[in-house]
Amino acid sequence: MGLQLYEYLEGWANFRIMRKEIIAVLIFGIVACGQKQECKKPRPVNPNGDSELALLMRDMFEESDSLKQLIIEGRLLTGLKKYEDIHSAIPTDPTVKGPVFEAFAEAYINSLKELESSDSSSVFKFNTMVDQCMNCHAEFCPGPKKRIKKLYIR
């Protein structure tokens, strides 16, 4: 009888300890699930914020990187985006817009047109387009120049 009582009491003690652990886990789960999760917004790439022009230029970079691969593979370039919006996109720094910027923008658009109409000299014309990007970024917003240099086809 003494051994049975001991086993019973030991089992009851273990149950009470487990019960406390189960209750603690349940309370933690309810509290954790009940708290509102804060979604962190992705940080902008540009520390000054993402203007229309910055977003457009990122798109221009992505397309240029894809064009580079097509040219390396010797594939035909058709349907290139002309990026006429470069003239109307709002920049991060409003003082950027002016005759000098407009001249660089037009030179870039013309280099895209030349690239699309090219046949065997597409590597040269692609690199000329990248030159137009580098020229503009030498004058305005030099930060992306390191990334743009990677577009050149060597």
Image: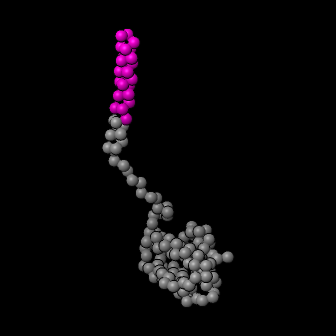
Which residue is drawn at the image coordinates 41% and 54% (left, top)? 40
User: Could you tell me what secondary structure mostly forms the magenta stretch?
Assistant: helix
Where residue 128 sits: x, y (%)? 61, 82
Magenta stretch in the rendered image: 1-25
Which residue is drawn at the image coordinates 43% and 76% (left, top)? 89
Tell me the quadrant of the picture where the N terminus can be found.
top left
Tell me the quadrant of the picture where the C terminus can be found.
bottom right
Q: Is residue 9 magenta?
A: yes
Return the residue found at the far top: 2
User: In the picture, residue 26 is in which quadrant?
Assistant: top left
Q: Closer to the camera, 88 or 154?
A: 154
Where residue 24 sits: x, y (%)? 36, 32
Q: Is residue 74 magenta?
A: no
User: In the picture, residue 126 is in which quadrant?
Assistant: bottom right
Which residue is drawn at the image coordinates 59% and 72% (left, top)? 148
Where residue 41 sits: x, y (%)? 42, 57
Placement of 145 over or under 37, stated as above or below:
below
Q: Closer to the camera, 42 or 29?
A: 29
User: In the picture, residue 123 is in which quadrant?
Assistant: bottom right
